[in-house]
Amino acid sequence: MPTPAAVPAPELSSVATALDDLTRRVTAIAEGLANTQADWVAQDLFAVERALRGAHRRLATLNERLRREG
């Protein structure tokens, strides 16, 4: 198991920021398509949004743990 010092914490933090931005973009697209003829696309995008939010939470938890242990 790698030591916390060997883990690229700054890069993981950057990925978390990118995930947050991507989530906002997907949400904006989904909201724009909701209640239109493309509502089915919006519903799938909202599912993607939920998955991205889950991934972001998991990454944030990992980053916090690395900060505590580092």
Image (cartoon, rainbow, N blue to C red):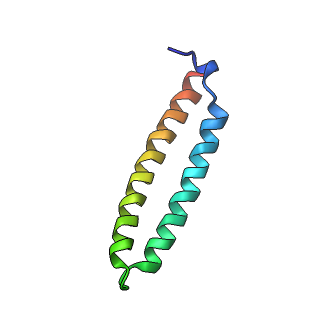
Q: Is residue 11 left or right of residue 46?
A: right
Figure check: 70 above or below 9: above
Residue 45 against residue 38 in the figure, above or below: above
Q: Quarter holding the C terminus?
A: top right
Q: Is residue 36 left or right of residue 24?
A: left
- Residue 36, horizontal then vertical, whole percent: 37, 85
At horizontal 35% and vertical 60% (from top left) the residue drawn is 47
The percent position of residue 29, horizontal first and vertical second, equals: 49, 72
Q: Quadrant of residue 55?
A: top left
Locate residue 57 relative to residue 13 in the image: left or right.
left
Q: What residue is at 61 percent from the left and 40 percent from the top?
A: 13
Residue visible at 38% across and 57% down in the picture: 50
Residue at the bottom extreme, as displayed: 36
* For residue 5, above or below residue 55: above
Is residue 7 shown left or right of residue 34?
Answer: right
Give the image location of residue 68, x and y in percent. Answer: 55, 26
**Which image quarter: residue 6?**
top right
Numbered-mark total? 0
Seen at 45% across and 52% down, the residue is: 52
